[in-house]
Amino acid sequence: MNTELSGDFIPHMTTGDRLRRIRRDLKLTQHEFAVELGVKESTYNAWETGRNAVADEVAIAKRVQLRWKVPAWWTLGLESNG
């Protein structure tokens, strides 16, 4: 099996992966983060673990931006407009 990469490699991150990164950097538990986002802890856990996709990614990204000032474009995995 060849594991060498050619050219630029950008690992894929889901919205759940990005939310996990934000939550961990803020040193919050899944429960605390879910409460702040206004979702059930089980729903949030399913996003982080990849069992379910975030249904309304834009709304969640906007909540994260308003609450913690993390740009919505980053949470959504888009490039900066700047």
Image (spheres, rainbow, N blue to C red):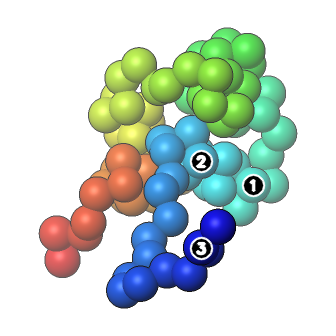
- For disc 1, the marked residue is 24
Q: Nearer the viewer, mark 1 or mark 2?
A: 2
- Where residue 74 appears, x then y in whole percent? 39, 59
The amino acid type of the residue labelled 3 equals Asn
Mark 1: give few (<14), some (14-19) or many (20+) Cα within 10 Å. few
| Point 66% across, 47% down: residue | 20
Q: Spatial distance from mark 2 to mark 3, Cα to Cα?
A: 26 Å
When the figure is inspected, residue 79 is found, relative to residue 60, above or below; the finding is below
The amino acid type of the residue labelled 1 equals Arg
- For disc 2, the marked residue is 17
Closer to the camera in the image, 66 or 74: 74
- Assign the C terminus to one quadrant of the image: bottom left
Q: Are marks 2 and 3 in contact (CB under 8 Å)?
A: no
Q: Spatial distance from mark 1 to mark 2, Cα to Cα?
A: 11 Å
- Residue 2 badge: 3
Examine the rendering and report whether any part of residue 3 can be seen: yes
- Where residue 27 appears, x then y in whole percent? 80, 55
Look at the numbered disc 3 and give the secondary structure of its residue: loop
Residue 10 placement: quadrant: bottom left
When the figure is inspected, residue 54 is found, relative to residue 71, above or below; the finding is above
* Horizontal side of residue 44 vs 37, given as left or right: right
| Point 36% across, 86% down: residue | 7
Q: Earlier in the sequence, mark 1 or mark 3?
A: 3
Q: Nearer the viewer, mark 2 or mark 3?
A: 3
| Point 49% across, 80% down: residue | 5
Q: Earlier in the sequence, mark 1 or mark 2?
A: 2
